[in-house]
Amino acid sequence: MSIFSRLSDIINSNISALLDKAENPEKMIRMVIQEMEDTLVEVRSSTARVMAEKKTLTRRLDQLRAQAEDWEYKAELALSKDREDLARAALLEKAAIQTRVETTEADLFKLDETLDKLDGEINLLQEKLNDARARQKTIVMRTRATSTRRDVRKQLSNQAIDNAMDKFEYYERKIDQMEGQIDSDNVEQKGLQAEFDELAREENIDQELQELKDRVKSK
């Protein structure tokens, strides 16, 4: 596949469609970016070669035009010396050079068209590459987030965690029982103390009643 057909394929490709069909989007986007970067390097190298060729043709064109002007000057000089034969020969040389000038001008025109096309495709490829790089960051973040969620889900479904949670619940029930026992003991202790307090009050009342009886008798 030539560089131009591959470049056209990349520029016309739909990155979203490629990623939708990929089993591994992260790997696919890396491959796409690598292909774009490699193609961009090749296209820029081709552009540099075309520009160098354009400079060479431009210099050649300048030289040919100078030669044509020189032969025209020689034809005029020959006529001024009444050498029509030399003037004719000079004009023939000029005509031959003029043909080469026209060919070179046509080649330069084609090179300019090629450079314009390459510049446009480089810009399009750079836009595609920027888009792919932006998507790569998003895909990497989503992939990592998905992987983390998958790991968490695995951990939540892990039997060891279920056993640990069962133990937590067991110990919570034990603590509830211990707290309940402590509360029950406190109630019993408070009830027993209340009975002793009641006995003490009754004893005080009996003693006070006896003292009152003794005072009444003494009168």
Image (cartoon, rainbow, N blue to C red):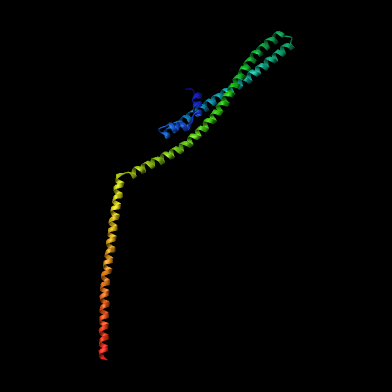
Q: Residue furthest bottom?
A: 219
Q: Residue furthest top?
A: 85
Residue 98 position by quadrant: top right
Where residue 73 sits: x, y (%)? 70, 15
Residue 109 position by quadrant: top right
User: Is residue 161 shown above or below 51?
Assistant: below
User: Is residue 211 shown above or below 14?
Assistant: below
| Front residue of 63 and 101 | 101
Which corner quadrant holds the C terminus?
bottom left
Which residue: 47% across, 36% down? 135
Where residue 46 sits: x, y (%)? 52, 25
* In this rendering, position of residue 188 left or right of residue 83: left
* In this rendering, position of residue 145 left or right of residue 81: left
Where residue 189 sits: x, y (%)? 26, 68
Which residue: 27% across, 58% down? 177
User: Is residue 67 shown above or below 18?
Assistant: above
Where residue 118 sits: x, y (%)? 55, 26
| Front residue of 119 and 138 | 138
Which residue: 36% across, 42% down? 151
| Front residue of 57 and 17 | 17
Which residue: 69% across, 15% down? 72
* In this rendering, position of residue 192 left or right of residue 26: left
